[in-house]
Amino acid sequence: MEKDELSNHIKKAQSGSTESFGVIYDQFSQPLYRFIRAKTSGNQQAEDLLQETFIKAWKGLPLFNPDAGSFSGWLYKIALNAITDHYRKNSRIIQTVEIFDNLDAPASLNSEQDLDKNLSSEKLRQMLSQLPDNYRTVLELRFLSDLSIKETAQALNKSSLSVRMAQHRALKKLQTLIKQYPEHELR
Amino acid sequence: MNSADNRKKDDIQSELSKLSESFNLPKDSQKQIRNSVLAQISNITQDQKLTLVKKTSWTFGLARLSFALAVVFVILSGAVYASSQALPGTALYKLKMAKENVELNITPSPQKKAYIKANHAQERLNELKAIDNPQTPQSQQPQKEEALGRAKTEVNQAINSLQKVEKDYERKGNNDNASEIRKKIEDLSNEAKKQGVKIEDNQGKPSKEDKRSQNDKERRQDNQQTNDSRDSENSKASRKNNTSGKIELLDVKNSKKTEDN
């Protein structure tokens, strides 16, 4: 979706158009879900949090100021707060390890190629879970949700420079972890 | 970082992007959530949305008010601080006097009041010194008479109050404090004399107010005595009148008796 088109829908949604909000949902639900899913332990929990995020976004839309930052950064910030609130209510700490351990296996694992790919992803998930939480969140926002550096910075309330630094360090650390694994174990 | 490292980094990034596919939201779930969200938000009235906005604007309003109050407080504190150096005739001098009055009025203890009065008197003497200073602008010179008059009043009042406190300490046998007060009186008197401020002779004697109240008391006592003596005379007179009345009555009775006989 073009930027102008999106801002048009945001304006319409701000003045009460549920139809435009539906378009916004279609645009953001998938990457937002990927981000929430990576931070939660089950599909159902992630779906509930996705729904909660969009309802909160609707309620808070009159406060959204396009001059203050991007819409996606604002939306991901709401999602992060919803996740934090969810874990606070349930008196649980976000478990970085279980996020990637509890993933449901993809439905189709027919070819050998798919199996190899899956094993590789499995190792990658394990390595990601060994990263500090702030590094992991940056990587999730950047590569799982495809947010730009600026949008990631807005969602995390950080400067673009610190996000860039965190991303660089996170990738370097991940690289080190990959090096520690023997080549045959990665596949 | 070399090109091999960069390539590896790119690989990791593409692996991470591939990983995101594992987290895809199934189409039917996506549609289901969409319907649920749209159904729920259509029930959220504009008022509910506005409440959130109003709440936030109220918070912003409070923050703005607090900021404004903080600014006023800082300006006032600055003005009060700046006024401590003010000389008679300047704009801040009234503020300085007001501050001293407040300081004096909120102090309940007579001992502390006496000390504060002494400090204020010392400040008046400092002002006199500052006006006499050749570096002080000529515009301040006409204020000298006024400053001298004020210094005289305040120094005498301070010495008076200090002497009362000194006597009080002496009566209680607290000689250390009494001698400290005596020293303060002496310092203030010497400083005042240096500045040409006349110390009144009646120091240690009752103040004008005390004198006035003493005179009132004496006058009241005199009046009471006069009233008392007048009352006693009246009562004597009435008693005498009563007695003479009785005598007259007796005389009439006696004369009637003799007539009857």
Image: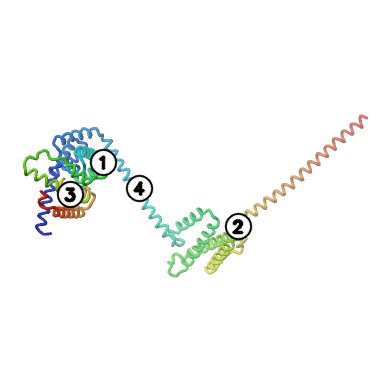
Q: Work out whether mark 2 precedes mark 4 in sequence or the reverse, and give the earlier one.
A: 4
Residue A15 visible to an observer of this rendering: no
Type of the residue with mark 4: Leu
Image coordinates for residue A53, horizontal then vertical, percent: 22, 40
- Whole-angstrom CA distance, mark 1 to mark 4, is 34 Å
Tag 3 residue: A128
Residue A87 percent location from the top left of the image:
26, 42
Image marks 3 and 2: residues in contact by CB distance under 8 Å: no
Chain of the residue where label 2 is placed in the rendered structure: B
Residue placed under numbered mark 1 in the picture: A86
| Among the 4 quarters of the image, the one containing residue B257 | top right
Cβ atoms at labels 2 and 1 below 8 Å apart: no
Residue type, mark 3 in image: Leu
Whether residue B84 can be seen here: yes
Q: Few, some or many C-alpha atoms within 10 Å of disc 3 (few <14, some 14-19, many ≥20)?
A: many
Q: Are marks 4 and 3 on the same chain?
A: no
Query: Residue B92 in the image: x percent, y percent?
Result: 43, 58
